[in-house]
Image (tube, grey):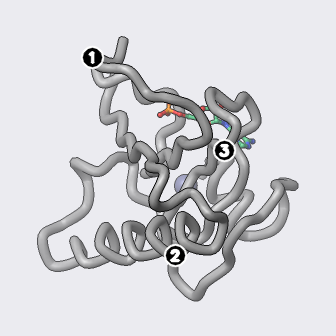
Amino acid sequence: MDCIFCGIAQGSVPAALAYEGERVLAFSDLNPQAPTHLLIIPRKHYASIQDVPAEEIGIVGEIVTVAQDLARERGIWPGGYRLVVNAGQEGGQTVGHLHVHLLAGRQMHWPPG
Ligand code: AMP
Ligand code: ZN
């Protein structure tokens, strides 16, 4: 399978890593949309959040825990941050490996585009 984020998880594609765990990885987005823009991914390939089976949904909680830890460690909290999961074509997903965006360091606006 030709997946860029699997490549990052396996170390064959370079990335600026922010967190490396047994099941979860975080790294800087190549095209940042905020002063802090990290992507948090499961090492295991899921094409989107819609493709995580119910019995494996705990991985999403692990990703959120990593987001909380990064927000704490980097002084992002209590200022605030935004977690974004784009899913599928109309959801704006462009990379077909589940990822959660962690955006921070500027005022966020609503609604998103
Ligand atoms: P999405 O539109 O939610 O699928 O987001 C995909 C994100 O991955 C975009 O913000 C891209 O800038 C980012 N991206 C694509 N390739 C890489 C890469 N090799 N390293 C880091 N970020 C990437
Ligand atoms: Zn993948």
Q: CA distance from mark 3 to mark 2?
A: 14 Å
| Above or below, 41 relative to 4 | below
Q: Which residue is labeled 2 in the image?
A: 69
Residue nearer the viewer, 66 or 15: 66
Q: Which residue is labeled 3 in the image?
A: 36
Residue at (51% x, 49% y) in the render: 102
Q: Decide: marks 1, 3 in contact (CB < 8 A)?
A: no
User: Can you give x and y, in whole percent of width and height, for residue 66 in the image?
Assistant: 49, 73
Which residue of the protein is positioned furthest toward the bottom in this rendering?
A: 22
Q: Judging from the image, what secondary structure is the residue with disc 1 in?
A: loop
| Above or below, 2 relative to 66 | above
Q: Amino acid at mark 1?
A: Pro
Which residue of the protein is positioned furthest toward the left in this rendering?
A: 54
Q: Judging from the image, what secondary structure is the residue with disc 2 in?
A: helix
User: Can you give x and y, in whole percent of width and height, for residue 70 in the image?
Assistant: 58, 68
Q: Is residue 55 left or right of residue 7?
A: left
Lower position in the chain sequence, tag 1 or tag 2: 2
| Above or below, 89 relative to 72 | above
Q: Is residue 9 left or right of residue 104?
A: right
User: Can you give x and y, in whole percent of width and height, for residue 26 in the image?
Assistant: 63, 63
Q: CA distance from mark 1 to mark 2?
A: 26 Å
Residue at (66% x, 65% y) in the render: 74
Lower position in the chain sequence, tag 3 or tag 2: 3
Q: Is residue 25 left or right of residue 96?
A: right
Within 10 Å of the Cα at label 3, are there few (<14), some (14-19), or many (20+) other Cα atoms? some
Q: CA distance from mark 1 to mark 3?
A: 20 Å
Q: Amino acid at mark 2?
A: Asp
Q: Indicate which quadrant contains ligand 1.
A: top right
Q: Which residue is labeled 1 in the image?
A: 111
